Image: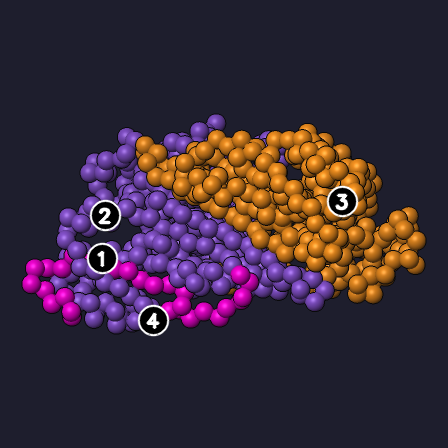
Chain colours: A purple, B orange
């Protein structure tokens, strides 16, 4: 019996889950649920499309529902609505609001005796896990998270809102010297500016004041003002040719000391280099959908995060096989 | 109430656990149990020393027992003996014999309603975890484990057994070109020789036939014959000055494809650089001793591995705090 997965929301993340299901033979895609008119949505693999308002009619056919909306607007309202009826997985990534999201979701999930797995992906997600494991092993130390090189959708959108800008792509780039200092065990104190730089590729309207656009970008509070930012003006053709991918990545490092007098230094480093940010995130979501379904079958319910999931639940392989092959 | 830890066996690993307990204020060292005459053993921190034969008299005072013996001889007999009476943690690392060790231990641990956590450390241990997580996320891919640069005790011992050798230290070194190929997503097929080289530092007896020793090392089956090996003869003084540490490390990489037509490549890399192999292993053992104790308090019993432990059990922090700080 395959695990029947449904997708709510059909953007990059939804398409990523659809592709991931093809690679995981213990899962199958039951269908895509959308707020658009279903007949206008064409799926990559020909999967069935339903309107989101009809989802309760499909309740008995869905083992886990992966919510593929955006954190800011969709997830806070969607996840608590659905998780009374379904095992759900989301990628809620507004770090500061996770405790609030957790407590909202926990209540209804427990009421419906379902599992709601929140904040799944790579950060939050795999990076969070690595921060936890590393801190538990090396309590006397510091951790460092670097992002990139990769496209930040939020920063790209912020540039696109500037008058005279047609299109934009922003890359977040970790500062190599900062990473090297951490790797050497120097435990540096790093300012925002010392950790990352921002590189922007901008297509401007003909005749636009490029100097003004560049200044508006570089002085934008929260997004750019605290960083060393470079701006390149390019043609739409160059944009399409060289900047159409959505790569990302980054690393979590922990540098810690052990020994009677803290005489030994250890460096733990976890890094990701991703051709497609949404497809990797989707792959993590699907593994945790498997876990949510299996944990719920064992009688567990309520809100869970990656911290609450024993790794064996993520794999379709038996525990015997995992011990034999991977331990 | 602190978690009361006992140590069985007082070598490098036992001393490492003793130091790690100092860094973890929710734990305390109840005592060290040894096969030697207790009065001959002096602990680093002045901890109490008892004879191992008396350990059952201390049963009520010990929350978790960390077995710090060697895999080959001590662990297969020690762990199944103790885990009927204690929550135990060991670092059993003979990969091929893990399934057998698991089933022996599982029976008695269940009988005693205790948790026995086996094969804890970094490989098996943290590396195993990373193989599992990465395979579950990227099922269409390959994983690669490299070890080093670091001292292999087994290989150093093998050289010391050669006639005319006084002391020896062997470093396992990963081949940079192989790592780079994996990082590029080339999915190489790598022979033993292509993955690691071996570098040996040897102190020979005066007048010994150095040519013969070098040949004996390089042609030694299993240990060296399948590798490119270099041998350096040095003085005992150089050995003490430059090769007294026990550094180690390594990395687990997974390269996997996603997308409708496998068009996107992702690289997951986990690496360790350790000044002291036994102290890092000890730090992992202590975190899993905490988990064993907590899981047992919740009513769980039987043999467990790192695959069965939800990450939150490893940290002394509350789940709320973990979500707030690390998710």
Q: Nearer the viewer, mark 4 or mark 2?
A: 2
A203 in the magenta segment: yes
Ranked by sequence position, the earlier of labels 1 and 2 is 1
Q: Position of residue A60 (x, y in %)?
A: 42, 35
Q: Position of residue A150 (x, y in %)?
A: 34, 53
The residue closer to the viewer here, B172 or A260, is: B172
Ranked by sequence position, the earlier of labels 4 and 2 is 4
The residue closer to the viewer here, B57 or B229, is: B229
Query: Dot 2 falls on which chain?
Result: A
| Alpha carbons under labels 4 and 3: distance apart | 60 Å
Dot 2 corresponds to which residue?
A242
Q: Residue at x 47, y 41 (%)?
A: B177
Numbered mark located on residue A201 in the image? 1
Q: Nearer the viewer, mark 3 or mark 1?
A: 3
| Alpha carbons under labels 4 and 2: distance apart | 27 Å
Q: Are marks 4 and 1 on the same chain?
A: yes
Helix, strand or loop under label 2:
helix
How packed mark 3 is, by other alpha carbons closer than 10 Å (few <14, some 14-19, many 20 or more), is: many
């Amino acid at each position: 019996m395959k695990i029947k997965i449904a997708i709510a929301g059909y953007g990059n993340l939804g398409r990523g889950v659809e592709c991931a299901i093809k690679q995981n033979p213990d899962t199958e895609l039951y269908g895509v649920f959308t707020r658009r008119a279903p007949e206008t949505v064409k799926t990559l693999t020909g999967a069935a499309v339903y309107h989101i308002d009809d989802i309760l009619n499909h309740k008995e056919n869905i083992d886990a529902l992966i919510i593929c909306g955006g954190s800011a607007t969709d997830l806070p309202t969607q996840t608590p609505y659905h998780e009374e009826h379904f095992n759900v997985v989301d990628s809620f990534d507004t770090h500061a609001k996770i405790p609030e999201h957790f407590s909202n979701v926990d209540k209804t999930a427990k009421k419906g005796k379902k599992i709601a797995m929140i904040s799944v992906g790579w950060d939050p997600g795999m990076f969070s896990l690595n921060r936890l494991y590393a801190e538990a092993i090396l309590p006397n130390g510091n951790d460092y998270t670097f992002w990139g090189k990769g496209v930040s959708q939020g920063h790209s959108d912020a540039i696109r809102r500037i008058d005279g800008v047609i299109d934009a792509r922003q890359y977040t780039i970790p500062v190599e010297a900062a990473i090297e200092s951490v790797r050497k065990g120097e435990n540096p104190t790093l300012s925002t500016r010392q950790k990352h730089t921002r590189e922007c590729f901008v297509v401007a309207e003909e005749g636009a004041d490029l100097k003004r656009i560049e200044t508006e970008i570089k002085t934008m509070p929260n997004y750019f003002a605290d960083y060393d930012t470079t701006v390149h003006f390019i043609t739409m053709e160059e944009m399409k040719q060289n900047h159409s991918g959505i790569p990302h990545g980054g690393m979590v490092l922990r540098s810690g000391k052990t020994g009677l007098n803290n005489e030994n230094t250890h460096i733990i480093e976890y890094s990701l280099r991703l051709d497609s940010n949404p497809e990797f995130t989707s792959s993590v979501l699907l593994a945790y959908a498997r876990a949510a379904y299996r944990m719920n079958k064992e009688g567990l319910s309520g809100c869970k995060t990656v911290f609450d999931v024993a790794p064996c639940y993520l794999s379709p392989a038996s525990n015997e096989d995992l011990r034999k092959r991977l331990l």
